[in-house]
Image (tube, helix red, strand yellow):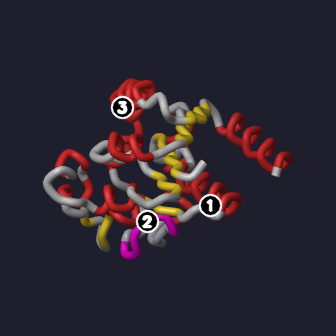
Amino acid sequence: MKRVLVIGCSGAGKSTLARQLNERTGLPLIHLDRLFWKPGWEQSDILEFCDCFASFRRNRIATLCDSDEWIMDGSYFSNLSLRLLRADTVFYLDYPTHLCFRRVLQRIATGYGRDRPSCAEGCPERFDWEFMQYIWTFRKKRREHILMLLDRNKHLTLRRFSHPRELAQYLKQLESIG
């Protein structure tokens, strides 16, 4: 386990799991939200972020993926194929929509107006209707595509969790081994 992806819907706990894995393994941690968002919730140039242009110019993600070791959290579809090719392990938090939606609402309520460690500075927690719609439709619109990409990448060690209890049991087993 040297190149690890943590993917899933917003609110699933990707950043939290990535930090936990970082603490256990010491692998460098890369939060894609910190790279994609600029202060004031301004999006990065898509050419810097999208693997479909990688053959024409090196983008930030391609460069990071070339490193020997990393943990990356984020489900950005513009570069997911590239990251899957370079990863050796994927943690897919395949949680129910209502759970992710509730977690994001709780995160907004408790952190409103404050920056999160996994996001860029100058991007305070806020309520965004478009973001809430993204969460509500994530599973319906993106899940099959994710599963298809995971199935195509046979080289991956896949850890797929359908509920936080499953992940908690897995992490507990890791603690007892190490």
**Left or right: where 118 falls relative to 38:** right
Q: Residue 178: x, y in percent?
A: 81, 52
Mark found first going from the N terminus, 3 or 2: 2
Q: Residue furthest right?
A: 176
The percent coordinates of residue 10 (x first, y second) are 46, 46
Residue at which label 3 appears: 142
Residues tagged 3 and 1 counted as in contact (Cβ below 8 A): no
Question: For the residues carrying marks 3 and 1, which lies nearer the camera in this image?
Answer: 1
Residue 57 location in percent, x, y?
Answer: 17, 59
Residue matched to label 2:
119
Going from N to C along the chain, the mark reached first, 2 or 1, is 1
Q: Is residue 131 visible?
A: yes
Tell me the SS state at disc 2. Answer: loop
| Amino acid type indicated by mark 2 | Cys
Name the residue: 38% across, 61% down: 64
Q: Mark 1 points at which residue?
A: 22
C-alpha span from label 2 to label 1: 17 Å
Q: In which quarter of the image is residue 141?
A: top left
Q: Does residue 139 lie above or below 86 as drawn?
A: above
Q: Quadrant of residue 80?
A: top left
- Pick whichever of labels 3 and 1 is earlier in the sequence: 1
- Mark 1 secondary-structure assignment: helix
- The reply to whether the magenta stretch includes residue 121 is yes
Q: Give the range drawn in magenta.
A: 117-122
Residue 84: x and y in percent read: 41, 41
